[in-house]
Image: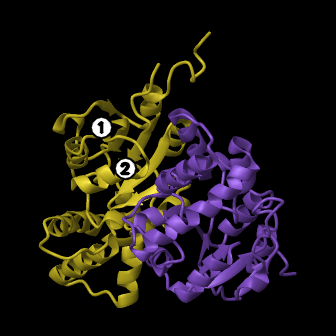
Chain colours: A purple, B yellow
Amino acid sequence: MTKRYSVLAFDIFGTTVDWFSGVSAEVGPELADAWRERYLPLLRRVNSGDREWANLDVLHREALDELLAAQGVEADEAARRRMVLAWHRLPAWDDVVDGLSRLREHYVLAALSNGGFALLTTLIESAGLPFDCILSAELFQAYKPDPRPYRATAELLGVHPEETLMVAAHAWDIDGARAAGLGTAFVERPREKGPHRVADRAADTVSDISVANFGELADLLIPRQAAGTHG
Amino acid sequence: MTKRYSVLAFDIFGTTVDWFSGVSAEVGPELADAWRERYLPLLRRVNSGDREWANLDVLHREALDELLAAQGVEADEAARRRMVLAWHRLPAWDDVVDGLSRLREHYVLAALSNGGFALLTTLIESAGLPFDCILSAELFQAYKPDPRPYRATAELLGVHPEETLMVAAHAWDIDGARAAGLGTAFVERPREKGPHRVADRAADTVSDISVANFGELADLLIPRQAAGTHG
């Protein structure tokens, strides 16, 4: 069996780690929810050129300040900094470490996230995620779903875009990767936005592969002979 | 004890892995030696702006082609590609994996090398080096000792240059890091250039720290209390 892909690129927030639980533990579920909704438009303003590049910590802080002001919540500088750092240490979904460890035997595994480089480095180390390398939107000064981060990932790792598989739990990320010429794998994370919001589903986009977790992804992508079923 | 540094950045070729043995095994010691000597000037031409950016694989190939032509050696395309790939898989020095593993408990460990991003990803995975992240000159389109890669490393990891310690076996790398405002640790690798050339020595430069191997570096940098001597 010839492998179609040689590099697997993984989205992080929601796909690999449970941001909702992690951030809720620091700021409560309502604020976590409103916060995530509020920074996505800021990110789009950077991509459209309406505002200069700023990394995710800066955008998170701006969105937080706006939100606390709108809600009339008091929080001092130290508390706000601590809240922003809640995004730097988040728990992995249960299937992630085992799935990545299996896949790493056969593929180059890259984290490809809109998180800042320092954030991703801390997050990946603290969650014990066995990636081969970390690629952040910060390196390219463009946020997904802009085509640049997807194409740069393939180029830096010395492969064609179609040899790179983007794994993500969000329709907008899958759409961006497909538009940039990458293969796509949608992973369902029904609890990604917590109990009160509906997460994206496979039917919301078009992807080459659709799976329920990283274990299923490993079952699909690891060549059968290598998996030991060559009897 | 307060730690002076929070990020340790490691040079790779010669400092962390034994390029001479690895490349000699593929092309022989004479060619390995001449090859390394020949690509360093190419790298300086990129930094000076005399030539456009090209990653290390491209510079390695150019230097190899020139060298084979000068020596009248025949080698087909496949052989030349294989030779260039010899730089992608090299053995770590004996003290490296243990030293890095100990240091990683206390510091963020970054690879910071002039090698291309794909090369470094393959090299670090195959040698089993426990880095937290990989930073390549290719990301910044500037080669060490230009100040940009050193400063970008600190900035991307969210620390001041003086909180970052550059660990290297070459005087030019230590000089570049110091000029960019980083702390510096010289590590002696007397066999770095093989048996017929003299490697750089601590006395060839000025560094904050000088050690014989990564074990000594860990002994120096790991806070005593954390090392278990608080009885």
Q: Earlier in the sequence, mark 1 or mark 2?
A: 2
- CA gap between label 1 and label 2 equals 17 Å
Compared with B174, B148 (above or below) is below
Secondary structure type for disc 2: helix
The C terminus of chain A sits in image quarter: bottom right
- The verdict on a common chain for dots 1 and 2 is yes
Give residue A109's quadrant in the image.
bottom right
Give residue A132's quadrant in the image.
bottom right
Residue A40 shown left or right of residue B187 in the figure: right
Amino acid type indicated by mark 2 = Glu
Q: Which mark is residue B68?
A: none
Q: Is residue B106 visible?
A: no
Residue A195, x across and y down, in percent = 84, 59
Q: Which mark is residue B155?
A: 2
Q: Nearer the viewer, residue B221 or A209?
A: A209
Q: Is residue B103 visible?
A: yes
Q: Nearer the viewer, residue A72 or B140?
A: A72
Secondary structure type for disc 1: strand
The N terminus of chain A sits in image quarter: bottom right
Compared with A168, A77 (above or below) is above
Q: Which mark is residue B184?
A: 1
